[in-house]
Amino acid sequence: MIHLDTSFVIDLMREQARQRPGRATAFLEAHAGDQLGASVFAICELEAGAARASRPDRERARLRTVVQTLSIAYPDERFAPIYGDLLRRVHASGHSVSVMDLLIATSTLADDAELVTAKQKHFAQIPDLRLLPYS
């Protein structure tokens, strides 16, 4: 399984709006047979962005078109222990990670998935997280 980070979905939606395929579209085509998902936390970030758009209803509709094709990962009983351990390990290494990025990473790890993101440096300090570029 591959989890899509917020940055990837934003790039994909921009490509669709411009009607000009780019690197996000190319990544999807290259991974057409893979199961794609996203953390509910990535979806929350996307919904917040849509709510702040100049035309929020239109942006929400565009977002829902993309989201309906994904498997959404919600926290379950595995989530809290993974999150706690990741936070401990990140802090022990002397680094910091934003709460939302750590939540997205936790969902990805709970699903034993890889994370595709344009913001690799945001996730680079998270132990055991497998990152996929899409350039």
Image: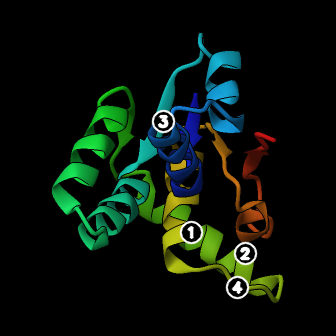
What residue is pinned by disc 3? 16
Q: Residue furthest left?
A: 57
What residue is pinned by disc 4? 96
Alpha carbon separation for disc pair 4 and 3: 34 Å
In the picture, measured across the screen, residue 67 lies left or right of residue 134, that is left
4 or 3: mark nearer the eye: 3
Q: Residue at x 30, y 62 (%)?
A: 50
What residue is pinned by disc 1? 102
Out of 115 and 32, give the one closest to the viewer: 32
**Cβ atoms at labels 4 and 3 below 8 Å apart:** no
Q: Quadrant of residue 47?
A: bottom left
The reply to whether residue 76 is visible in this rendering is no
Q: Residue at x 56, y 69 (%)?
A: 102
Q: Residue furthest bottom?
A: 94
- The image quadrant where one finds the N terminus is top right
- The image quadrant where one finds the C terminus is top right
4 or 2: mark nearer the eye: 4
**Cβ atoms at labels 1 and 4 below 8 Å apart:** no
Q: Quadrant of residue 119?
A: bottom right
3 or 2: mark nearer the eye: 3
Q: Amino acid at mark 3?
A: Gln
Task: Please tell me how crowded label 4 is: few (under 14), some (14-19), or many (20+) other residues with Cα within 10 Å.
Answer: some
- Which disc, if any, is residue 89? 2
Task: Please tell me how crowded label 1 is: few (under 14), some (14-19), or many (20+) other residues with Cα within 10 Å.
Answer: many
Which type of secondary structure does the marked residue at label 1 adopt? Answer: helix
Q: Of callouts 1 and 2, which one flags the residue occurring earlier in the amino acid sequence?
A: 2
Residue 118 % position (x, y): 70, 55
